[in-house]
Amino acid sequence: MKPWSEFEEAIKPHLRHVRTYCNYLTASKWESEDLLQETLLRTFKHYRDNGILNHPRSLMYKIARNIQIDAHRRRRAATVPIDEALQLPHYDANYANVRGMLEWMAEHLSPRETEMLLLAEVFDYSYQDIADALQCTVPAVKMVLHRSKSTLRKRGRQPETGVSRSRMGKRRNAAPLPFTVDRWTTALMTGEL
């Protein structure tokens, strides 16, 4: 049997458990998949170097945990304490990108559409939670989200045509007041509403 086949047979019964453990250790699905892949690579390297996997699940748990600890240390060394970051959000490297994206959304969506879209897509609110917060119905939330996403897809594909804002229609062109864009920028930068 080839080394890869032996390795695959050794880890296969434990893969579901290790995937669950990676989900537990990380903040998102993508980070979890990256962690799982890196864990499998390092486990295979260990197998290739030693020729045997004693207690594969324990080994993969240990490797995943160590990878996550190393990643946390790297991030901690590169981040600013949250109190300091809250004081100076304009100096964050991502601030301009976040603010620019929100201003672009504000040009194409109403304040209500922008708020619903951010609550649903960024802060993972359920339709019912959005309806409760904005005092509307769940079907209204679904309709607004569908329309907002459709509008942004169309605007994202079309080059600027030089159409004046007055010809775009009043509902779409009613951009949030500056404090609204500021409020959402701060919420996106801090991850809290």
Image (tube, helix red, strand yellow):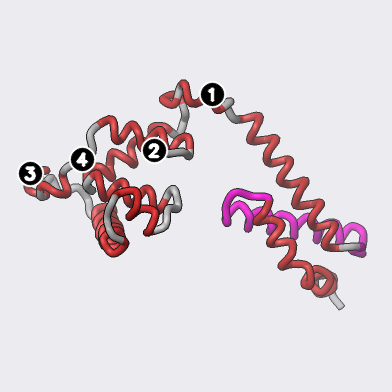
Q: Amino acid at mark 2?
A: Val
Circles 2 and 4: CB distance less than 8 Å? no
Q: Amino acid at mark 1?
A: Asp
* Residue that badge 2 annotates: 98
- Kindly report which numbered mark, 4 or 3, lies closer to the viewer in this rendering: 4
In the image as oriented, which residue stretches furthest toward the left?
167
Q: Earlier in the sequence, mark 2 or mark 4?
A: 2
Residue occupying image coordinates x 28% and y 30%: 179
Q: Position of residue 111 (x, y in %)?
A: 24, 44
Instruction: List the residue tagged with mark 4.
Output: 175
Say what secondary structure mark 1 lies in.
helix
Q: Marks 4 and 3, Cα distance to the nearest angstrom?
A: 13 Å
What separation in Å lies between label 3 and label 1 (alpha carbons)? 42 Å
Query: In this rendering, which labeled residue sits more in front, label 2 or label 4?
Result: 4
Q: Residues within 10 Å of mark 1 (few under 14, many from 20)?
A: few
Q: Which residue is mark 1?
A: 83
The image shows residue 129 at horizontal and vertical percentages of 39, 54
Give the residue displayed 34% in from the left and 48% down from the top.
133
Disc 2 and disc 3: Cα gap in Å?
26 Å
Task: Name the side, left or right, on which 14 lies relative to 169.
Answer: right
- In magenta, the rendered stretch is 25-54
In the displayed structure, 143 sits above or below 86; it is: below
User: Residue 54's quadrant in the figure?
Assistant: bottom right
Which element is circle 2 on?
helix
> Mark 3 — residue?
166
- Kind of residue sitting beneath label 4: Ala
Magenta span includes 40 = yes
